[in-house]
Amino acid sequence: MTLTRRKFLSSSVILGSSIMLPKITQAAAAQGRVIVGYENLAIGPIGQVLNQINTILGDYYKAYQYSFDEVIGNNTIKSMVEAKEGPADGSQLLFAFAPQIDIFPEIYRKLPYDPLTDFKPLVLLGGYTFLITVGPAVDKSVKNIDDYAKWVDANPEYRNIGFAQYGSSGHVTMLMLARGKNIALRPQSYRSLTQLGADLADGNLAAGIVLTGFNRKLYENGTLRAIGTTSQFRHPGYHDIPTCREQGLNDIDISGWFGLFINAQTPEDRYNKLMYAYQNSVTRGDYLKVLQQNLFKPIFDNPEQITARIQKEQQFYRNVIEEYRISRL
């Protein structure tokens, strides 16, 4: 079964006996809901990952069968509030990218949720890094970040650089890149990675900060070219792309993740059953295969480790926002 834009996955199974026996029906799982604050995730690698985790989850957890619903608005904050205020019984979960959890509390002066007290982590579904990417608007002689810096100096009309979501890890990367290489870049925020990739491919945008795994065919056919990655080490599937650190940007070590969370008021027994089901699901070989195919990294953090990771990342971005004087909202 494939994902649709509004309902990523929704199904139930009814089992029956042979004609000669009284019909026996197994109770269908109740319908659950996973709230998603981003547009068009059904199109692309995240959709494939979500399809796979939902398929596997049914082997470990029978109480709910989840559909994925987009709740769009206010830079994804609408989805966070809806998840916070929704039922705390396991019927409603939250899909989140790292910035909603680790950067937004630092960049917003007043946020209507607290990621550490309003939600409990269930599982991190995968990890990614960012590709500093140039499109067909940039001369093909540009092979690395230093080449790009010189090219922008010579072509200042192309100094816009795109990223998905104001206040995201991509936004922070762009600011660190501009300062580290002394490039007069101008930030251009997009609502979705799909829109960002389309503008890069069409030549409407010269460069962008793109998540690994997205727009893969455009990289393979040469329309888009990655000139650097933002993680400390080279990312699986992109071993030929040097990191920013390898290119003199020693302060850039930025990666991200996506995962599932639940209302913190959910009873402990219900939380534990669902958490263990998801934790088991992400270790399965068929799930890891889909992650690898879509160029994401597995993450095997338990809830305590996820919380520690979030706290560490919040401190990192708190320092970056202060140092780079990023305007708070």
Image (tube, grey):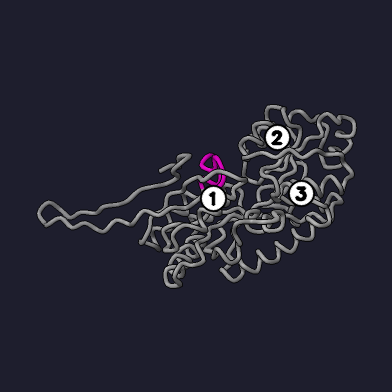
Helix, strand or loop at disc 1?
helix
Q: Amino acid at mark 3?
A: Thr
Which one is earlier in the sequence, the residue at label 2 or at label 3?
3
Query: Residue 268, image x and y in percent?
Result: 46, 72
The question of residue 39 being in magenta is answered with yes
Query: Residue 216, image x and y in percent?
Result: 62, 39
Location of mark 2 (residue): 224
Query: Residue 308, image x and y in percent?
Result: 65, 69
Is mark 1 in CB contact (under 8 Å) with mark 3?
no
Helix, strand or loop at disc 3?
helix
How many angstroms separate mark 1 from mark 2 (CA)?
Answer: 31 Å
- Which of the two discs, 2 and 3, sits closer to the camera? 3
Location of mark 3 (residue): 173
Q: Which mark is residue 79?
A: 1
Residue lying furthest left = 20
Is mark 2 in CB contact (under 8 Å) with mark 3?
no
